[in-house]
Amino acid sequence: MKPNPTPRPADPKLGPGPAPWQRAWYVVIFEADTRAGRAFDVVLLATILLSIAAVMLESVTSIRLAWGRALTVVEWGITVLFTLELAARLACVDRPLRYVLSFYGIVDIVSILPSYLALFVTGAHTLATVRTLRLLRVFRVLKMTRHLSEANTLLVALRQTWPKITVFLTVIFCSIIILGTVMHLIERDQGSGFDDIPTSVYWAIVTMTTVGYGDIAPVTPLGKFVAALTMLFGYAIIIVPTGIFSAEVITKSRAGGVVCGRCGRRAPDPDANYCSGCGSPLRE
C-alpha cells in the first residue's frame, strides 16, 4: 500500500512557532510547495542577483563615478531587506538559535555583515559577494533538494579520506621545502631570482602545481634539470588525492539507496520509492 506523504517543514528540527502567524510565515519563508512560498523564493533569488550585480558594478571606476550614489542606495536597501528577512526567519521558527548555527543561518548572517562593516572598514562592502552562497536555495525552488542532499556523500567521503590526504599533503610540503632549498643553492649566485629560500619555495609551489607563472626560472643546466624533475613530479602528484577521493565517493554512492530530499535519510533499499523516515517520494 502506497503511503500518503504529508507536507513537512524544510527542516523538521526547526519547526514553525506555536502562534498562527508564525506558522503562516513559516510556510511562506521556509516552504516552496505553495504559491506564496515559491514567489517569496523567486523574489529572494532575484534580489540576491541584483545585490551581487550592484557590488560588482560599483567596483568599476567609470560606473562608480557615474552611478555610485544610486548603487550605494540599492546596496543598502537590499541589506536592510535581508536584515528584515533574517529577523522574520528567526521570528517564525521554534528554535532560532538552531537556525543561526545552521549552514543557511550562517550564510544569511555573513551576507549582511559586509555592509555594516563598511561603516568602519573602507571597502568591506565588496565582500557582500558572499551572498552568492544564498543562491543555493535555487535547489529548493526548482525541487532539486534531493540532488543537494547528495552533498552529504561528498562530505562523508572527505572525512573518510582526510587522514590519507593529510599524510600525502605532508609529504608534498616536505618535498616543496627541500626542492626550494636545493634550487636556492644551485641558482642563488646566477641572478635568476632564487635569492632566498622563501622565494625558491614559492617557485617550487608554482612549478609543482603546473601553474608556471614564469616570473622566476633557472638558468644553469643543473637548475633546469631539477626544474624538469619537479615538473614531472608535479604531474604525478596531482592525480593521487583526486584518485583517493573519487574512489571513496564511488564507494559511498554504491552503499545504500537514494537519499531523501526532504529529511536527508538514505533508503536502505535501492529500489525503494518512498522514504522510510518521512514518507516522501524518493523519485519524481
Image: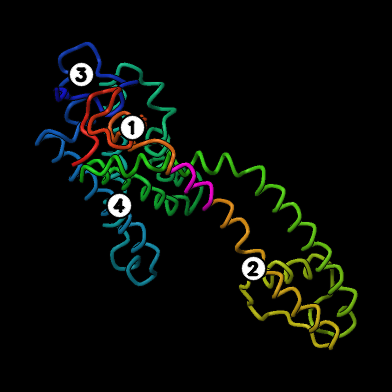
Q: Name the residue that disc number 4 marks.
A: 51
Tell me, yes or no, whether the highlighted magenta stretch contains residue 104. Answer: no
- Tell which residue pokes out farthest to the left in this image: 35
Q: Amino acid at mark 3?
A: Gln
Do residues under tags 4 and 1 come within 8 Å of each other at their CB atoms? Answer: no
Query: Which x, y percent locates residue 251?
Result: 49, 44
Q: Nearer the viewer, residue 141 or 26?
A: 141
**Cα gap from disc 1 to disc 3, whole angstroms:** 37 Å
**Quadrant in which the C terminus appears:** top left
Query: Which x, y percent locates residue 180?
Result: 81, 68
| Residue neighbourhood size for the residue with mark 2, other residues' Cα within 10 Å, grouped as few (<14), some (14–19), many (≥20) | some
Q: Name the residue that disc number 1 marks.
A: 269
Quick check: 251 left or right of 87? Answer: right
Query: Which x, y percent locates residue 148?
Result: 34, 43
Tell me, yes or no, whether the highlighted magenta stretch contains residue 249. Answer: yes
**Cα gap from disc 4 to disc 3, whole angstroms:** 28 Å
Q: Name the residue that disc number 2 marks.
A: 209
- Which tag is nearer the camera, tag 4 or tag 1? 1
**Cα gap from disc 2 to disc 4, whole angstroms:** 35 Å
Q: Amino acid at mark 2?
A: Thr
